[in-house]
Image (cartoon, coloured by chain):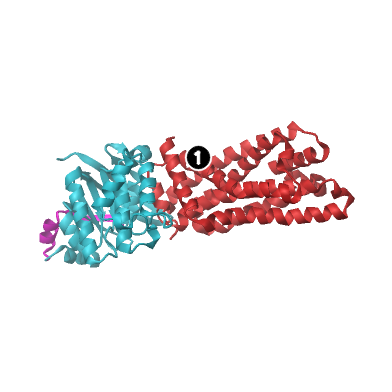
Amino acid sequence: MKFHRIYALSLRHIYLIKSSLPRILDLIYWPTIQIILWGFISMFFSLHSDYYNHTAGVILSAAILYDFLFRSSISFNMLFLEEIWSRNFTNLFVAPLKISEIITALTLTALLRTLIGVIPAILFASPFFGVSIFNLGPSLVLLFLSLYLFGITLGLLVTSGLLRYGPAFENIAWSSLFFLAPLGCIYYPLSILPDWLQIIAKILPLVYIFEEVRSILLNNIVNYANIITALKLNLIYFTSAVFIFYLAFYGARKKGTLINVGE
Amino acid sequence: MNEKIIQVKNLSKQFGNTLAVKCISFNINKSNIIGLLGPNGCGKSTTIGMMLGLIKPSSGTVLVNGLNIENNRTSLLEKMNFISPYIELPKKLTVEENLEVYGRLYGVKNLKDKVSDLMEKLNLNDFKSRKTGELSSGQKNRVSLAKALVNDPEILLLDEPTASLDPDVGDYVRSFIENYASIKGATILLASHNMNEVERLCHQVLMMKNGKIIDKGKSNDLINKHGRKNLEEVFLKIVRE
C-alpha cells in the first residue's frame, strides 16, 4: 500500500466536502435533529415515568451511538456513490490503485465525514439535555471502535453490491441499517425480543454494544465480556466483508461492469 | 524501433452467451500510434478494457512491456493512462484540484510544476479554479486530456478522444496528441470513428468487426488493397460486407 494514493483518494473527498457549505451543514443537520428529537422524548419520559426517571440519558446516549454507527456506514457508501454519480469510477480503476488502498482511503475519509456530523451533536446534547456521552468512561473508546467497525463492515458489503451489480444496488445502501436496527436492541434490552429473535440478534455485535451502554449508565458496571464479544464479532464480520469486496471486484472485472458503472 | 510494448495474444471475452471478442492477436511497437476501427458494438471498448485490466479476459493474454496485465495491474497502470468521452472527472472539484488528486494517485514528482505545465500547454489557466462540471465539453475534454497526461504515460489508450468536439477543438486535441507522441515517444492505441483522425495520426490500423480483427495495415495500404479513395470508404465497405 502506498500512502500517496490513499491520501489522494481521501483528498478528492476532502475537497468535495470543504467546497460546499450546504454539504457540511447536511452532515451536521441530521445527527443534530436526531439528538433534539430523542432529547425531547427522553425529557418526556423523565417527567412521566418512574422507570425512565433514572434512565433519561440512556436513550439519548444510545441515539448518539446509533447515529455514529449510521453515519459511518452511510459515509462509506456515499464516498463510493459519489464516484458512480460523477462518472469518475472508471478513472479511478485505471489508476494504479490497489483494492486495499481504496478500502483504507474510504475508511479514513468516512471517519472524517462521520465526526463532522456527530461531534456537534455530542456537544449539543450536554448543555441542552444534560446528557454527556463521556459518562460512559474509558470504555467509550472501545464502544466507538466497535460501532465504527460494524458501520464500515456494512459499508463494505453495500459497496460490494454496488461494485458487482451497479447503481441498481443503491437503494440497499440507504436501507441496510434500518433492516438491522430492530434486532440491534439499541433503545431496549435484548429480553424485550421474542426468544427466537434473541437467537438471531445475538449474532449481531450491536446487541452487546448497547447492552453494555445500558449496563454502564444504569448500573455503573463495566462488563468487558460484552465489549470483547462485540469486538470479536466485528473482526470476523469486517474480515469477511473485505473478502467479499475483493470477490465483488473480481466479479465486476469478469462481468465487465467496471468500465461502464454509472451509465 | 520494433520493441513490442503491447502484445495481445489470442484474446477472447465472453459475456454470458455473447462472444464479444474472438481470439484477437496484435502487437503495438514502441512509439507507434495504432488505430482501432470498427462499428459500434464490435468489441473495441471490451478490448481496451482488457488491455487496462478492467475486464478479465475469458482466454488469452495482454502483455505490457512483457508483463501480463492480469498479474501486474498496479505497477503497469502507473505507466499507462486512458481517456474516454464516456467517463468524467469529479464535477464538483476544480480543474486544479482534479489534476492534483490524479497527480497524487499516480505518484507524480514535482506535482505543482507538472500541473502548472499541463495547464499552460492545454490552455487551462483561465478556468483552473472553476468546477469541472461547469466547463464546456471542449474545456472538459482538455481537462481529461491533462489528467491522462499527468503521469507522462508511456502508453496511452484513447477511446474516441475527439468525439462531440467542434472541428477547431478536435484539431487542437489531435495536434496535441501528435506532438506528445513524437516528443515523449509514447505508444498510443486510438479507438475512433473519425477516419481523418486515424489517417492523420496512426502508423497502422486494426479493423474490427463482430469481435474479430478482420484486416490490418497502414492506412494507405488498406485504401489501395480495398480499391477505395480513403479510409472512410474502406471502413464502410468492410462494415457492410
Query: What stretch of residues is rendered in magenta?
Result: B211-228
Find disc 1 in the rendering and name its residue: A104
Say which quadrant the N terminus of chain A sits in.
top left
Question: What x and y, as percent, mark residue A246?
Answer: 49, 42
- Label 1, residues with CA under 10 Å away: few <14, some 14-19, many ≥20: some
Residue at the outermost right position: A50
Q: Position of residue B222 (x, y in %)?
A: 14, 58
Which chain: cyan? B
Residue B155 in view here? yes
Residue B191, image quadrant = bottom left
**How many numbered circles are shown?**
1
Task: Between residue B87 and residue B132, name the one nearer to us.
Answer: B132
Identify which residue, A12 or A89, lies in the foreground. Answer: A12
The chain coloured red in the image: A
Q: Chain of mark 1?
A: A
Q: Is residue A125 above or below residue A140?
A: below
- Residue at (29, 65) in percent of width and height: B164
